[in-house]
Image: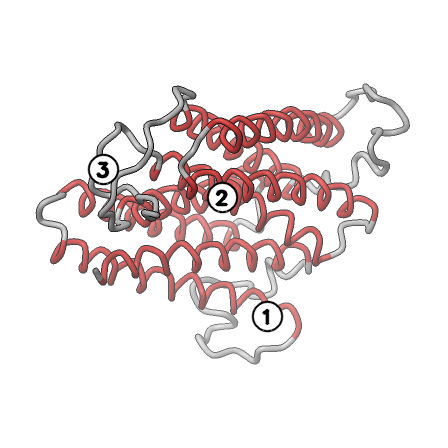
Amino acid sequence: MLHARAFKVSVVWTLLLLYLGSVVHATESSLACPDWPTCFGTMLPEMTGGVFWEHLHRLVAGGLVLMFMLATWLAYKETRARPWIFRASLFGMTLLIVQSVFGGLTVIYELPDLISTTHLSLALLFLALATLLASSTIVIADSYPAPSGFRVRAWAMVLAGFVFVQSVLGGLVRHMDAGMACPDVPLCLGQILPPLVNAPITIHFFHRLLAILLAAAVLWFAHRVYWEETWLPIRRWAKIVAILVVLQVTLGFVSVLTLLAVIPVSLHTLLAACLLASLIHMATIFPRSSAATPGVLAPPTN
């Protein structure tokens, strides 16, 4: 079905947009275009320096709006039997429009922390919704083994919620310029518990603390799923989330050690978004019962 492909493209497109957004900030290009929605009064500015990254980010964002409009229209045409998909798509369009407005406000008001972080938060919410829609439109045909009893769906959604909170906290670290508030790793200012004397140190420290706790929880979850579930697709995704969380923590350390170099910082944001999408995908595709259910991926038969 065309709407399913459009939702999948939207997920990948959103991940690209989040990566570009991180590059824009890491290269200090956020205000390279001082006006919005135009750039120096035109939609076709000279694509050099910071203008290249900032305007490219805007163009990709505009393309995503058009792509999801197409996905929404296709959902309206092709999912009459599942009307919630179209309604969710309309909500997604609303999220995109509001998120775009906040993108403009970040420029107009010159990057206030709250508005910039809200801009990121709305992007992550849209990614979560787009992933849910893409995962819910996977076609199935076969049955699957009975679940082990471990509450995969519930745990995946809970962990996805914490990944969202951690990503928003990371956005706050970024927009408060607190990325180097703790210039050493794994300690912070040479201590396990640093003096929390100001907001940048406090935000940075709690971002690290939550990262460690969340990484441990995700690895425990992946271990349980991989060794207790017999359904092959969910075991594959358990390995993927385990790899993503290890790489994510590693990139967090590398970002500090390289004094917030563009590539590790931007990949750090991208992998957080990939982890969020992967957990939501796992929760969505996991079997609800011992019989095949529409919209849930089924395992291959042997």
In whole angstroms, how far apart are the C-alphas of marks 2 and 3?
A: 19 Å
Q: Amino acid at mark 2?
A: Arg
Q: So how many labels did they put on this image?
A: 3
Task: Please indicate whether residue 157 sits to the left or right of residue 290 in the image.
Answer: right
Q: Is disc 2 surrounded by few (<14), some (14 to 19) or many (20+) residues within 10 Å?
A: some
Q: Which image quarter is the N terminus in? A: bottom left
Residue 20: x and y in percent read 56, 60
Residue position marked by numbered label 3 in the rendering = 292
Q: Secondary structure at mark 2?
A: helix
Q: How is the image coloured?
A: secondary structure
Q: Residue at x 60, y 54 (%)?
A: 22
Question: In front of the other: label 1 or label 3?
Answer: 3
Q: Earlier in the sequence, mark 1 or mark 3?
A: 1
Vertically, is 50 above or below 102? below
**Considering depth in this image, is 229 or 46 the residue closer to the camera?**
229
Q: Residue at x 31, y 55 (%)?
A: 7
The mark found on residue 236 in the picture is: 2
Residue 276: x and y in percent read 49, 40
Q: Amino acid at mark 1?
A: Val
Residue position marked by numbered label 1 in the rendering = 51
**Considering depth in this image, is 246 or 235 the residue closer to the camera?**
235
Is disc 1 in contact with disc 3, using a CB cutoff of under 8 Å? Answer: no
Q: Residue at x 40, y 37 (%)?
A: 231
Residue 90: x and y in percent read 22, 47
Task: Please indicate whether residue 260 sits to the left or right of residue 288 in the image.
Answer: right
